Image (cartoon, rainbow, N blue to C red):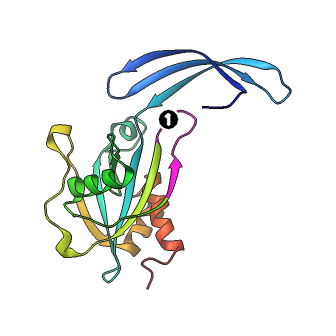
Amino acid sequence: MNNNRIKIKKIDILSDNWYVLKKVNFDYQLEDNTWQNQNREVYDRGDGAVILLYNQAEKTIVLTRQFRMPTYVNGNDNGMMFELPAGVLDNDTPETAIKRETEEETGYHISQVEKIFEVYMSPGAVTEKLHFFIAEYQKEMKIGEGGGHKDEHEDIEVFEIPFSKSLEMIKTGEIKDAKSIMLLQYAQINNLLND
């Protein structure tokens, strides 16, 4: 943090239950060189990683579906979300974390991943930086059922679907998850699975 136009005055912890919600009071120097005092709430849930698992020969991908309370309270009828496998880093490198999350959520053991970019998903309120990966999978890489960790209250369904169907699911609104849409469109733009 080396922006000389920012002077942090005070940080209060508003909540430290699931993740950490902070209220930051700071002075900000405007373009006209005047200073303005501001307050912002910052939600720190840690950084994460997401992956598009694709099978080039079969033209398929792996999706998960699980209940997401924030979407439910914001009008997502049943709260269920189709997503690509993802999770928080938990002090691991992004590569290690996404391999772990892939196996926990989908049952696929992936040894090689390719990082394509990293993104701040909601920079106005959330600190999270998300690392985006792709990896090819084969049927023989499936070593478990997936479904997530029961002790983390995860109840994840796993789907293998045609890539073309996933693009249709974006159009119909079945896939509403930004990180998943970004990776699926990356695959489309870069012809990873096109016929």
Q: Position of residue 85 (x, y in %)?
A: 32, 56
**Residues shaded magenta:** 117-128
Q: Helix or strand or loop: what does disc 1 sit on?
A: loop
The 10 Å Cα crowd at callout 1, few under 14, some 14 to 19, many 20 or more, is some
Q: Give the quadrant of residue 150.
A: top left
Quarter of the figure with the C terminus: bottom left
Q: State the count of labels.
A: 1
Residue topped by disc 1: 126
Task: Confirm whether the magenta stretch covers residue 12.
Answer: no
Q: Residue furthest front?
A: 2
Q: Main secondary structure of the magenta part?
A: loop
Q: Nearer the viewer, residue 89 or 191?
A: 89
Left or right, 117 with reference to 55 = right
Residue 135 x %, y %: 35, 68
Q: Position of residue 121 (x, y in %)?
A: 51, 45
Q: Residue furthest bottom?
A: 195
The quadrant of the rendering that contains the N terminus is top right
Identify the amino acid type marked 1: Val
Residue sitting at x 31%, y 61%: 63
Q: Which residue is found at the position 38% from the left and 34% from the top?
A: 73
Measuring 20% from the left and 38% from the top, which residue is drawn there?
152
Foreground of the two, 168 or 101: 101
Describe residue 5's horizontal placement relative to residue 107 as left or right: right
- In the displayed structure, 124 sits above or below 191; it is above
Judged from this view, the residue extending furthest toward the right is 32
Position of residue 15 relative to residue 176, above or below, is above
Task: Say which residue appears at 14% left-offset and 59% top-offset.
Answer: 145
Query: Quick check: 135 left or right of 29?
Result: left
Residue 11 in picture, x, y percent from top left = 52, 16
Q: Along the line of sight, which residue is nearer the eye, 141 or 71?
A: 141
